[in-house]
Image (cartoon, rainbow, N blue to C red):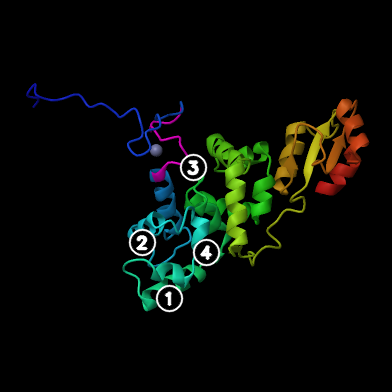
Amino acid sequence: MRTGQEKAFHLPKECPVCGVKLAKNSEDVIWRCPNIKCKARQRRYFYYFVSRPAFNIEGLGPQIINQLSDGGLISDPADLFSLAKIDLLNLERFAEKSADNLIKAIQNKKQISLSRFIYALGIGGVGDETARDLASRFLSLENLEKSSLEYLINVQDIGPKTAENIYSFFRGKENIMFLRKLFKNGVEIEKPSQIKGKVGKLFGKTFVLTGTLETMAREIAKEKIRQQGGDISESVSQQTDYLVAGDNPGSKYDKAKQLGVKLLTEQDFLAMIE
Ligand SMILES: [Zn+2]
């Protein structure tokens, strides 16, 4: 069907909005603008943040977001929560009543479930299904925030790439500041009601294993810890709660002792996971 008149398609090399060179990582098929200050990216994130599966703020569509942003009233989504009626009255299209309604709609959504909140962060690979899985697994933002990469990778249904995205999100300075700003402006994550009973008894505890265990392979021991919600780390640090010491423990044992980490014999450990 070709006529010979077709023109080759050239993918742009730079972002059409901010002009920064586009980038693509090896696993990805999509070229993206890597500039987090890019206007286009920021707008997109705004739309995403207020969308139905995220903060679900009614009456706050792209047009109004653009207007607020162009008017210099909001520079990131956290600014939405500190908007006042008087700010809006200075804008075109806003009258007493519509300004009132929008402020109310925003303020009504300050309390948010953990899963929606996680989704709203816009972490690569974390759709609403994954956000829900993470919320029921971690139960609080702090737990998710402090999770080791290794633990995240081992969470069912979370691929290594997504695990890495989550881990590095919480280590990004700008992201941490954004989270702080959200809370400062009154955003509150609801406490899950069904919190007790579902959590393993080792939840939030970090274990390091060293030496040879007599009664079970190390991988099995790790699996048991994870099944009960515990976390495993390869090296001893201030964050370690327990060191399980089998036969011939090495330098990890000395370090744990030095740091005052609780030392468990194999017997202690077996009693704990029973
Ligand atoms: Zn850009």
Residue at mark 4 to residue at mark 2: CA–CA distance: 15 Å
Would you name the residue on which mark 3 appears?
Answer: 125
Q: Position of residue 210 (x, y in %)?
A: 84, 30
Magenta highlight range:
27-39
Residue that appears at 49% across and 56% down? 77
| Secondary element at tag 2 | helix
Q: Which of the numbered marks, if any, corresponds to residue 64? A: 2
Earlier sequence position, callout 4 versus callout 3: 4
Q: Position of residue 14 (x, y in %)?
A: 35, 30
Quadrant including the N terminus: top left
Q: Quadrant of ligand 1?
A: top left
* Circles 2 and 1: CB atoms closer than 8 Å: no
Front position among marks 4 and 3: 4
Earlier sequence position, callout 3 versus callout 2: 2
Asked whether residue 10 appears in the rendered view, the answer is yes
Would you name the residue on which mark 4 appears?
Answer: 81
Residue at mark 3 to residue at mark 2: CA–CA distance: 28 Å
Answer few, some or many: residues within 10 Å of disc 2's Cα (few below 14, many 20 plus, some between 14 and 19): some
| Secondary element at tag 4 | helix
Residue at mark 2 to residue at mark 1: CA–CA distance: 14 Å
Please state if 135 lies on the left or on the right of 73 as rendered.
right
Answer few, some or many: residues within 10 Å of disc 3's Cα (few below 14, many 20 plus, some between 14 and 19): some
Q: Is the residue 102 above or below the residue 257 in the image?
A: below
Tag 3: residue type?
Gly
Front position among marks 3 and 2: 2
* Circles 1 and 3: CB atoms closer than 8 Å: no
Please state if 72 lies on the left or on the right of 221 as rendered.
left
Would you name the residue on which mark 1 appears?
Answer: 100
In the current view of this chain or complex, which residue is farthest to the top?
4
Earlier sequence position, callout 4 versus callout 1: 4
Earlier sequence position, callout 4 versus callout 2: 2
Q: Position of residue 81 (x, y in %)?
A: 52, 64
